[in-house]
């Protein structure tokens, strides 16, 4: 075992960062607000620029999801690599676990989409559009399809480009950690070089193609997970800054709040503001990780409602937008407050059912199936996130 890996077990502890669940809870609220235009009018909100930015902050929320997911993913894979009881083929089992975890709610949504197409057909979504959407959702190539076929894709499933990007980058990061994880310095270097290339490529494609394609393309949207992965690699070094944990968290939270009020849905998000959002999220995550468990559990991010929203953020992200569209289609004569209550209520109810009936049993099954089980449990579950 190399000297690099010998240092890791002391710092990569098997902890559940409750405050990170709370952070993801805030992110999923922002995603739902950014899609709420389907339920409520934006005219009055747009009269107040700060409020308008908050209600159009889905891109910022996606960056938060990507950074947190990249951090937890790489952190968990590095820890798994250094467990004494680690078995051969662990990266393959990890890839299967994560793919199944994400695919299950997506496939259930596809089934619901076909059922709705038969029982409740809509003039704006024909059969060919539904079939093409299902095919690319099922193969997690939806973001690539949306790049070239925006008018042939079901718009009520447009948000799921994030799920495709998330899973694609997840598999790449698992492979990189499997190949380079025993030399953390080398893994760090590869992630850093890749991140610089991604940022440069995004700036180039924006200059040449505009903002739409870079908004969906894997190679231009993977920067958040790379930032999170770099933070996980640097965690042993961060131990030296533990006494400043609260200050680091405060700086990250303050910067992210200011960006939330200032950026909104501005196309410049894909330029340097996007990287500022990722860096602010990294600072916030680092502060949470460095705080003692007792202090972190008392932090504002760890309040129970936000933590619950964070833990159901995957099914909530997947299901809320189609529900919003369905409710809007059938309640055109309703007042917007009534539509909003129904849309939000149905989304939360479906997410709760999916969490209890599908997600939790699936996680337990993946821990016990012979092919996928782990010798110990690490808290590295994906998030959507996760607009």
Image (cartoon, grey):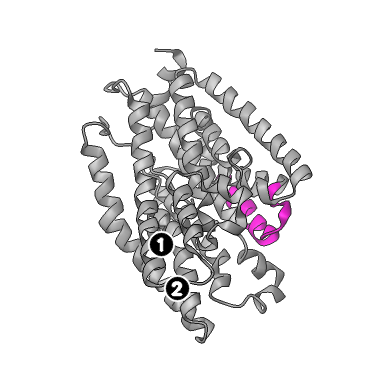
Residue 378, image x, y percentages: 33, 37
Q: CA distance from mark 1 to mark 2?
A: 17 Å
- Tell how many labels: 2
Q: Can you say whether 124 is above or below 283 in the image? A: below
Q: Which residue is mark 2?
A: 343
Residue placed most toward the observer, 366 or 256:
366
Tell me the residue at 22%/36% (across/down). 369
Q: Taking the image as drawn, is residue 317 in sight?
A: yes
Q: Residues within 10 Å of mark 1 (few under 14, many from 20)?
A: some
Quadrant in the rendering for residue 226: top right
**Residue 13 found in image quarter:** top left
Main SS, magenta region, reads: helix
Q: Quadrant of residue 178?
A: top left
Query: Element under label 2?
Result: helix
Whether residue 290 is visible, yes or no, is: no
Residue 253 belongs to magenta span? yes
In the displayed structure, 250 sits above or below 40; it is above
Q: Residue at x 60, y 52 (%)?
A: 149
**Is there a contact, CB below 8 Å, between mark 1 and mark 2?**
no
* Residue 256 percent across, percent down from the top left: 62, 53
At mark 1, the secondary structure is helix
- Residue to which mark 1 is pinned: 113
Q: What is the x, y in percent for residue 315?
A: 39, 56
The span shown in magenta is 248-270
Q: Residue at x 66, y 47 (%)?
A: 213
Name the foreground residue: 277 vs 35. 35
In the picture provided, is 274 more to the left or to the right than 127? right
Which of the two labelled residues, at mark 1 and mark 2, occupies the earlier sequence position?
A: 1
Front of the two marks 1 and 2: 1
Q: Residue furthest right?
A: 207
């Amino acid at each position: 075992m190399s000297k690099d890996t010998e240092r890791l077990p002391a710092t990569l502890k098997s902890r559940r960062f409750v405050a990170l669940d709370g952070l993801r809870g805030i992110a999923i609220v922002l995603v739902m607000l950014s899609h709420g235009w389907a339920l409520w009018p934006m005219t009055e909100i747009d009269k107040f620029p700060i409020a308008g930015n908050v209600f159009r902050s889905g891109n910022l929320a996606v960056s938060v999801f990507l950074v947190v997911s990249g951090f937890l993913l790489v952190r968990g894979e590095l820890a798994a690599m250094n467990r004494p009881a680690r078995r051969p083929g662990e990266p393959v089992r990890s890839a299967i676990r994560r793919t199944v975890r994400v695919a299950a709610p997506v496939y259930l949504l596809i089934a619901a989409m076909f059922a709705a197409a038969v029982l409740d057909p809509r003039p704006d979504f024909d059969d060919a559009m539904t079939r093409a959407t299902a095919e690319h959702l099922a193969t997690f190539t939806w973001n690539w399809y949306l790049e070239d076929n925006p008018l042939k894709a079901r718009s009520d499933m447009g948000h799921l480009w994030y799920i495709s990007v998330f899973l694609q980058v997840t598999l790449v990061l698992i492979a990189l950690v499997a190949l380079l994880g025993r030399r953390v310095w080398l893994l760090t270097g590869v992630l850093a070089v890749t991140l610089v290339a991604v940022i440069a490529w995004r700036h180039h494609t924006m200059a040449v193609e505009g903002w739409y394609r870079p908004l969906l393309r894997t190679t231009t949207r993977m920067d958040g997970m790379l930032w999170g992965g770099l933070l996980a690699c640097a965690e042993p070094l961060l131990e030296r800054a533990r006494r400043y944990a609260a200050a680091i968290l405060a700086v990250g939270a303050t910067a992210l709040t200011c960006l939330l009020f200032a950026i909104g849905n501005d196309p410049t998000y894909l330029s340097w503001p996007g990287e500022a959002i990722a860096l602010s999220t990294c600072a916030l995550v680092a502060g949470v990780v460095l705080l003692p468990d007792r202090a972190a559990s008392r932090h504002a991010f760890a309040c129970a409602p936000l933590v619950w929203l964070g833990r159901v953020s995957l099914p909530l992200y997947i299901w809320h937008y189609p529900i919003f569209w369905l409710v809007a289609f059938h309640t055109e004569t309703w007042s917007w407050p009534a539509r909003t209550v129904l849309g939000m209520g149905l989304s939360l109810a479906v997410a709760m059912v999916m969490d209890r009936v599908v997600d939790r049993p699936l996680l337990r099954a993946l821990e016990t199936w012979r092919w996928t089980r782990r010798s110990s449990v690490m808290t590295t579950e994906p998030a959507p996130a996760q607009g």
